[in-house]
Image: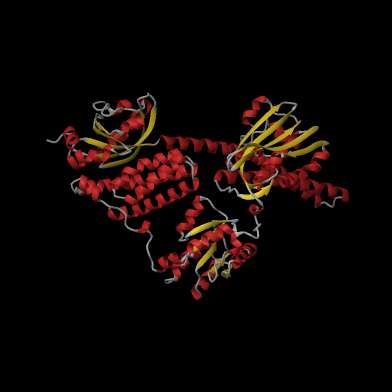
Amino acid sequence: MKTLKSYVKRGGFFKAVVEDGSDIIFIVDYSGEILYHNPSAKGTLGYEANSLIGKNFFDFILPETLPEFKKAYQQSTKKKFNESVEFQFLCKDKSYTYLEFNSINLYQKEKIKGLILDCRDIAQRKKDAQELLRAQKAKELFLANISHEIRTPINGIAGMASLLSQNPSANEQATYLQAIQSAADNLKVIINDILDLASIESGKLKFEQIGFNLNDLLHSLINTFTFQASEKKIELNYSLSEEANKIFIGDPVRLNQILLNLISNAIKFTHHGTISVNCFVKKKEAKRNILAFEVKDTGIGIPKDKLKTIFESFSQADASVTRKYGGTGLGLTIVKQLVELQHGTIDVKSKEGEGSTFTFTIPYELGSRNNIKGHLAKESPLLKKTLKDLSVLLVEDNDINRLYASSILKMWDCKVDTAENGYVAIEKIKNDYYDIVLMDIQMPVMDGFEATKAIHALPPPKNKVPIIALTANATRKDLEQCLASGMNDAIPKPFTPEDLYDKLTEYSSEFKKISQAAGIVPDYQKKTIDLTYLRNISNNNQKFIDDMLRAFLQSIPKSIEEINTNLVAKEWNALARSVHKLKPSLTLIGLHSTREKAIMLEETAKQQKNINAISFQANELCQELNVALDELRQMT
């Protein structure tokens, strides 16, 4: 008669699989007695090897959840498999952590009353869910507050428009029109704030790296506020140190936006005295300078107890401030995030009734006139480049964008043809030959995605023409959608000549054209799964192999989800841990090249030095894992 304990002792091949796994593996009998657990219990739960053997699994479950857990456990004893059972398990340090198990019932195969519990740590997933709920509640509160701010100017515009329809006098007309203009301006500010915050939170906000001169920027900015300051009889001035009066490389539009918000606030809350804007080099480094900007006013100041929350969404000093001065309360939130997204810091010092000083720093590399956007110096290498006889089809519905891109292409002696939508592009490809297609996404009649799929349906070799997306949406999700539709790559708008030249040379090279014309399959599309290792450790036990493959089918999508979640959240250490946990599974199913990519990604994520490389490697790894999943589905 077989016993569970004898099964554990003789199951050497199975232990070889689970000993080095990242999941916590328990073998328990139907009553809950623990007969085995692998070393992963120490990393997550803190328990030494074999220290839980002989103890009861139920004794480690959070007491108030035990009745519900026992029901799920009993259901597992009646099924061949059970999955995604969540519970909280007592750790060595007396805290509880969230786990989730998938179970295999040994009675179905071995007539043994026991379960194999494959447990995953889901504490981070639970934490993320709670944070998401908190964020959703915060947004609901924000929307309730902002709705008032939006309705107020809209009501004013509607009311004044109604009065204008009642044949008012000339003076009354002027008054009503001025009120409409003021309300419209307020509404514009509110909507711009909301759009900016939405862009920041969605990750869609992109920062340019172009040359700009601080003296030009500050002079123009101060002139913008001169009239407002003089109306309130406030002195407005600025100073720029000699070291800071240079050309730097960065995003001048976002710097202007930060200063615009801070100066606007200073004027709004200052009724007499002075507003000073100062800029100087705080620290010089080998390749960059850390610039400090100071906006100092003699206004109403900020109460001490409000200083900690002044940068939070919709958090002006109190509700009466919003009513008296207007605005969304988002200005400083946007300022803080714009500064921090550029690797800077911001601070405020204030005394109620005396004024406030906002100070922020942003690091910038030194540049030259050649770095200023739109400026191609006479010695610029791009002016000497040529792509003579390269045939390019530019698919773009916007006249200005079409003129800009085609002008650059002609500068390099390209043969340029244009199409205003996807339908026209397909007809042109049917009747002519192109080395490369530059494809806009959002177009009338037929968009870029539909056009790309239609092109790939054409007979060879025209279905192999490289397609590069030109897209104003440049998030990871947008790039994935471009690649999923069959495009080779994407260039975010607005793009520079350098961006375009790099892509053209990469995808129009002779090697690329020959390989595509020959129909060569990329490595990631080839069969990758090798079951040799699983067959060896199980003595070619097909049932065991099938069970393992089904387990991988369940676990790999969760790993992909974890990787993508951590990538979006920029949680690099968590991303490295997710990839590390995945590696044993890749060994088991023989995904050797994929495992090498996982090793590279884990190391890159740990170092946190090259964010672009992390993103590229993570997307490449997930792409290969999805291909492997398709293979697994065909095998099971």
Q: Is residue 512 left or right of residue 295?
A: left
Q: Classify residue 106 by image quadrant.
A: top left
Whether residue 137 appears in this view of the structure is yes
Q: What is the x, y in percent for residue 547?
A: 25, 46
Q: Quarter holding the N terminus?
A: top left
Query: Relative to 461, does residue 611 appear above or below in the rendering?
Result: above
Which of these two is toward me, 92 or 373?
Answer: 373
Give the tally of numbered discs.
Answer: 0
Which residue, as the protein is rendered here, is positioned at the far right? 170
> According to the image, what is the colour scheme of the structure?
secondary structure
Q: Is residue 172 left or right of residue 461?
A: right
Q: What is the x, y in percent for residue 41?
A: 32, 32
The residue positioned 18% from the left and 40% from the top of the image is 110
Q: Classify residue 82 by image quadrant.
A: top left
Which of these two is toward me, 113 or 354?
Answer: 354
Which residue, as the protein is rendered here, is positioned at the far top? 94
Whether residue 557 appears in this view of the structure is no
The residue positioned 59% from the left and 48% from the top of the image is 207
Q: What is the x, y in percent for residue 440?
A: 56, 61
Query: Relative to 376, does residue 268 appear above or below in the rendering?
Result: above
Q: Is residue 534 left or right of residue 383?
A: left
The residue positioned 50% from the left and 36% from the top of the image is 131
Q: What is the x, y in percent for residue 153?
A: 72, 44
Which residue, as the protein is rendered here, is positioned at the far left? 1
Query: Relative to 168, does residue 518 appear above or below in the rendering?
Result: below
The residue positioned 40% from the left and 46% from the top of the image is 600
